[in-house]
């Protein structure tokens, strides 16, 4: 009987441990596995990508459709080159889609917002978005404001 | 001066010899064809090492989760973002606190007991008498305890994380009034299973290896006297705690250093 109780408690611990791991997978991370399969990569060139980094969200109409993989400089255009990965099921971004760097809240993180255009052809793996709008840099904005202010008086 | 450098060298060589001995002991204990009878000894050790550590893990996990919920709430409500308390509690626990705290508790609760047990077996010449019977004490005594440590610590860490997260839920949601949906929702958005949960489990496996190995070697190689056993038990707790904290930094730097 003693031995049975011992085996029972060990079995219970193993069941509890494994189900805790499963609960961590489902409840805590929301079944949020890194989805690397069938995602496709697109690139966008920005005048200024200040504050944007890897893992930043890529959204369309406020819904997350991908994430930023890398931010670098395109040596030919001398612009910021933002590589993004878009989820495979989002296969309806037209080739005249425009990208802009937005901020969530006043001081929040930067993310990329996509606005779909009217063309029938869609973006495929390796395409480049031409129509972009850069990050809002607060210092430049203040500088411009002061400049205008100086002109008016 | 020369003498000092020579002494330093002697200490270093001595330590290296000890590590080599410990590695040899582990290899001799583990490289063996498993038998059916060794399975019941493993169950026995799983009970001693794992199940008996469960209570202390559950209680400390609950309190650590509650403290995290409370601290997170006071800190985050200053910025008006107390909904983020869920992701703070979960990420802190899953990435760092569960593996490290559970391992430290495990070293104190189970590691020291293993060292004392094996040390006493050595002092009372039980190990020697096993050898007289032609039974290798490494296979009979050391191997099941090692595997029990390797199996139970990761399980305990998973339980620890989950209980801690519910402890944080208890304080933040039930007592302080954070909306339950945003507690879980922010958490699910922020926690990635592969990146956070599995990396935490990898840490747990590494710590389990370090603790079991240290504890068993210290017990197996201790001076078979009362002072020797007491010194070996102390060394087990000190060495494995230091190893846990040191390796935790290295593992964190490898896992999260590049992206965060």
Image: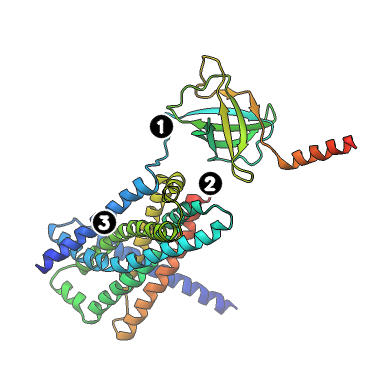
**For the point 26% across and 56% down, which residue is it?**
A16
**For the point 44% across and 49% down, which residue is it?**
B187
Residue B162 percent coordinates (x, y): 35, 56
* On screen, residue B228 above or below B30: below
Identify the element where label 3 is drawn. helix
Q: Which mark is residue A25?
A: none
Q: Of all residues shown, which one is farthest toward the top?
A: A120
Left or right relative to B143: residue A32: right
The chain identifier of the residue carrying mark 1 reads A
Q: Are marks 2 and 1 on the same chain?
A: no
The chain identifier of the residue carrying mark 2 reads B
Q: Of all residues shown, which one is farthest toward the right?
A: A153
For disc 1, the neighbor class at 10 Å (few under 14, some 14 to 19, many from 20) is few
Q: Which mark is residue A16?
A: 3
Residues A101 and B176: in front is B176
**For the point 46% across and 26% down, which residue is it?**
A90
Q: Of all residues shown, which one is farthest toward the bottom?
A: B226
Q: Which mark is residue A37?
A: 1
For disc 3, the neighbor class at 10 Å (few under 14, some 14 to 19, many from 20) is some
Residues B213 and A13: in front is A13
Q: Which mark is residue B259?
A: 2
Q: Nearer the viewer, mark 2 or mark 3?
A: 3
Left or right relative to A138: residue A20: left
Q: Are marks 1 and 3 on the same chain?
A: yes
Identify the element where label 2 is drawn. loop
In which image quadrant can residue A36 be found? top left
Can residue B22 be spotted in the picture? no
Can residue B198 be spotted in the picture? yes
Q: How far apart in space, not on screen, are marks 1 and 3 (Cα)?
A: 32 Å
Residue A13 percent coordinates (x, y): 24, 59
The chain identifier of the residue carrying mark 3 reads A
């Amino acid at each position: 009987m003693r031995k049975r109780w011992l085996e029972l408690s060990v079995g219970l611990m193993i069941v509890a441990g494994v189900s805790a791991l499963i609960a961590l997978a489902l409840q805590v991370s929301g079944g949020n596995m890194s989805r690397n399969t069938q995602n496709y990569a697109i690139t966008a060139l920005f005048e200024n990508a200040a504050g944007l980094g890897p893992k930043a969200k890529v959204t369309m109409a406020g819904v997350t459709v991908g994430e930023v993989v890398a931010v670098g400089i395109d040596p030919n255009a001398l612009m910021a080159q933002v590589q993004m990965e878009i989820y495979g099921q989002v296969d309806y971004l037209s080739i005249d889609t425009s990208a802009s760097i937005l901020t969530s809240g006043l001081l929040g993180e930067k993310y990329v917002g996509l606005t779909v255009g009217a063309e029938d052809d869609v973006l495929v793996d390796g395409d480049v978005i031409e129509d972009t709008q850069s990050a809002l840099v607060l210092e430049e904005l203040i500088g411009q404001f002061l400049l205008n202010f100086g002109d008016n008086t | 001066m020369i003498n000092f450098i020579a002494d330093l060298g002697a200490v270093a060589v001595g330590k290296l010899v000890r590590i080599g001995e410990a590695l040899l002991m582990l290899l001799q204990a583990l490289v063996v064809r498993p038998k059916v009878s060794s399975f019941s000894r493993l169950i026995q050790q799983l009970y001693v090492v794992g199940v008996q550590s469960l209570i202390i893990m559950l209680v400390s996990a609950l309190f650590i989760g509650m403290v995290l919920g409370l601290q997170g709430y006071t800190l985050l409500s200053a910025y008006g973002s107390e909904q983020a308390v869920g992701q703070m509690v979960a990420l802190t626990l899953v990435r760092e606190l569960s593996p490290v705290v559970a391992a430290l508790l495990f070293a104190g609760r189970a590691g020291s007991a293993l060292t004392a047990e094996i040390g006493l077996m050595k002092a009372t010449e039980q190990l020697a008498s096993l050898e007289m019977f032609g039974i290798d004490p490494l296979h009979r005594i050391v191997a099941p305890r090692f595997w029990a440590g390797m199996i139970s610590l990761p399980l305990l860490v998973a339980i620890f994380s989950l209980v801690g997260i519910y402890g944080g839920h208890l304080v933040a949601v039930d007592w302080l009034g954070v909306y339950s949906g945003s507690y879980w929702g922010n958490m699910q958005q922020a926690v990635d299973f592969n990146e956070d949960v599995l990396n935490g489990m990898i840490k747990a496996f590494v710590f389990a290896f370090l603790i079991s190995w240290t504890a068993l070697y210290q017990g197996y190689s201790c001076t078979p006297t009362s002072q020797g056993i007491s010194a070996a038990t102390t060394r087990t707790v000190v060495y494995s705690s230091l190893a846990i904290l040191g390796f935790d930094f290295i593992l964190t730097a490898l896992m999260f250093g590049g992206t965060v």
